[in-house]
Image: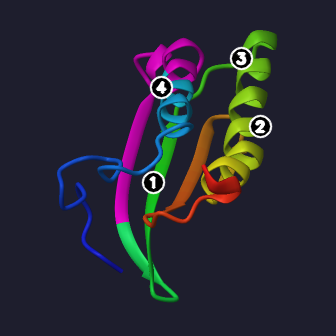
Amino acid sequence: MAEMGALPNGRLWPKGERRLSGKPLVYELITTARRYGALASEQGRLTVSWRVDTRDGDRRLVLDWFEQGLGPPEAEASVRRAYDRELIERALPYVLSGQGRYDVAETELRCSIDLPLTARWKSGR
């Protein structure tokens, strides 16, 4: 496992790599946390970490998102979280050849995003 922190070029995304869904994914997580999640209450807590791993000779960016102190579920919050889950678990593998996991419990949310740090993208994008 590689060290935690920024990539060698100081960016979250490698220079020249496709960023098509990276920004919307993180933006959606932040927006949902601010409106309905850990950042919406004084009791909430958000922890975000990332690292670069090497697996089977390929470098991968692994981002872990953990929210604690979620408020009571609301209908709108459930819809937003369903959209976030769709982006992370379904769009991420298709668009960025990554993997995602999105788990919501009564008072916490865990999300893991795993992306390749190579120029190999699906559909030649």
Give the quadrant of residue 50.
bottom left
Establish if 83 lies above or below 5. Answer: above
| Residue hosting label 4 | 30
Secondary structure beneath disc 2? helix
The answer to whether residue 99 is visible is: no
Circles 1, 4 touching at the beta carbon (< 8 Å): no
Establish if 12 lies above or below 77. Answer: below
Near mark 3 (Cα within 10 A), the count class, few <14, some 14-19 or many ≥20, is some
| Residue hosting label 2 | 86
Tell me, what colour scheme is on the image? rainbow
Q: CA distance from mark 1 to mark 2?
A: 17 Å
The answer to whether residue 97 is visible is: yes
First of labels 1, 4 by sequence position:
4
**The N terminus, quarter of image:** bottom left
Q: Inspect the image, locate mark 3, and give the three-letter code of the amino acid beneath it.
A: Ala
| Residue hosting label 3 | 77
Q: Inspect the image, locate mark 2, and give the three-letter code of the amino acid beneath it.
A: Glu
